[in-house]
Amino acid sequence: MTDPFDRDAEIQRFNAQGNRYVQARMRLESMATSEAERRVLAHILELTRQAQPEVQAVVEMSVFMDDQAAIFERIRNVAMPRQRAIAEQVGSLVDLQRQQTNQAVLDAEEAYLHVRTLMLSLGTLALATGILIAWIVGRHVTRQARQLADQALYDPLTGLANRTLLQRQLEYEIGLARRDGTSFAVALLDLDRFKAVNDTLGHTVGDELLREAGNRLLQAVRAVDTVGRLGGDEYVVLLHDITPEEAGVIARKLLDVLDRPFHWRNQGIDLSASMGIAFYPQQCDDAGGLLRCADIAMYVAKNSGQGYALYAPEHDQSNRNDLSLKSELREAIQSGQLTLHFQPQIDHRSQCVVGLEALVRWNHPQRGFLGPDSFVPLAEDAGLIGPLSHWVLRTALQTLLLLQRSGYPLEMAVNLSARNLQDTNLAASVQALLDEIGVSAKTLTLEITESAVMDNPGDALAILSEFDRMGVTIAIDDFGTGYSSLAYLKRLPVDKLKIDKSFVLDMEKNDNDAVIVRSIIDLAHNLGLKVIAEGVETQDTWDTLEILGCDASQGYLMGRPMPAEVLIAWLRESPYAKNLKRSLAVA
Ligand code: C2E
Ligand code: CA
Ligand code: CA
């Protein structure tokens, strides 16, 4: 028999368990989510429902009956097995839930790992992106900084050193040469005729040429040398550790690379350069002085047409002379120190003088007679070419009037400078002189050098067209020496080509010159132009020109440039003037 104390405890346990089941059921109901859970829960509910009357009966028995044993029997035999069944079901539900919880934990862990990996990757990506952005920004900033620095030190067009960097490099070279007891050279280069190319072909082509010229120079020098651009068409080359004896070879090399034609759209463009070279420490020992000396030497090179010149102290002297001449020239024009000489121009067909060329001279009070080559360029530089040309024109036209009135049916040729073509008032002032003096425009020829025309193609076209309308004859002087575009020449209202004397003087000995002379004559005639040769010193040359069909000639053979008085005697006596219909009433 069971101990009544045990039985009490057992009933209490049953009740407590019942309470727990109720609580568990409520909890489970609220939590049951999976299909399996719901199935187990339904089963529990069914079992509970079946157990309900038993439990009810036990409860009632315990209220209405005193028979503890019967109650206990009933509990043990009926209610408890049912409760156990329910408990088993609850247990399996709990297991199921535990399993699911475990699975959920596993899932969660897995998900967490996923997320963690994802976060880590994202984090890494973000970090990498951050670093990348920082790098890009950094690089951009450095590049900008470098660009700014570059702009400050390099010429944006050619990429060569600019004035600032050249200056620094020059100081650096001076330091090196001083320390090592070596010498170095500063070469200043200037492209000839660049302005003409720029004006005729446009700035894009001009820029391209400047870049190309820079590249060629860069390739022609050693890595230790510096090439820079000062602006415009001026380049500087610093030739490291070099002596004056070695300079000639390098100078020629630099000039040669620029002499090769430049190509643009199947067109060959001929440029050349002039170069002045100064040495440290032989000539100057500071940066500014070196550049100044190189500049003076370049001026000498340009004027001599020799390509390059090494600086010499005499250049400085001649520079000072130039300065004093310039200041005296203004005075000379006003005070009658200038005079004109006249050189006859002879027609081949009639063998007779048809024209005169007026050539200016300066009877300098201290220096004596100066030729135009020694002061016309100075007049251009000093802005005095306007007054000078005006004086020459006036004097030449006055002489012409005198001769015409004396019965000499002559024409007068007057030289104009490149600078004159920039004077927009020129045509008007020539017309005013013609009117004032009373000479027909038809008897005036203006000679303009080929290079002057090509240096100012735009100006030239405008002014020449005006002269053409006025009826003035235009001759292209020094023809054959300049960079001339035939297509361009055809558009100009030109009447005459004047073959440069450099070809004529040697044409009897030099076949090339003879070929050039013949070609110019044919070319002129094909273009419907007259042609005149200058520099005829021998009878052979005269004869050859005649055979080639040259229209007229000028030269020492027939007559030198002469002052007016000598010219009048020449007109009386020369065989080239004997057929001239003239009145003898010459003053
Ligand atoms: P250009 O116009 O070519 O003038 C011809 C030059 O050749 C003159 O030199 C003349 O004396 C010289 N000549 C003439 N025949 C012969 C010859 O048979 N053999 C040799 N060896 N030479 C000969 P010039 O008078 O010294 O003039 C030099 C240049 O000065 C001229 O060259 C001209 O470009 C310029 N010029 C002269 N007068 C004026 C002027 O009034 N105004 C301007 N703007 N320039 C002038
Ligand atoms: Ca001339
Ligand atoms: Ca000439």
Image (cartoon, helix red, strand yellow):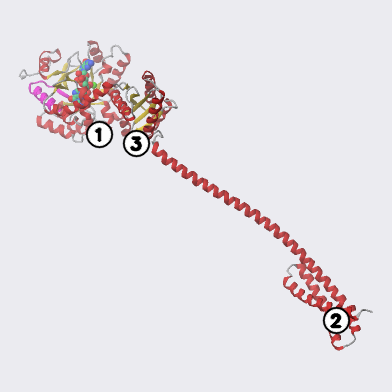
Region of the chain picked out in magenta, as a range: 393-415
Amino acid type for the residue under numbered disc 1: Asp
Q: Is residue 124 left or right of residue 237?
A: right
Could you give the CA–CA distance between mark 3 and mark 2, rounded to whole angstroms? 115 Å
- Upstream in sequence: badge 1 or badge 3: 3
Label 2: few (<14), some (14–19) or many (≥20) C-alpha neighbours in 10 Å? some
Question: 27 and 552: which one is in front?
Answer: 27
Q: Is residue 203 visible?
A: yes
Q: Is residue 267 magenta?
A: no
Q: Name the spot of residue 298 as percent of width and height, x first.
A: 30, 25
- The type of residue carrying mark 2 is Glu
On screen, residue 112 versus residue 271, left or right, reads right
Q: Nearer the viewer, mark 3 or mark 2?
A: 2
The residue to which callout 1 is attached is 459
In which quarter of the view is residue 150 placed? top left
Horizontal and vertical percent position of residue 213: 38, 29
Residue denoted by label 2 = 54
Mark 1 or mark 2, which is nearer the start of the sequence? 2
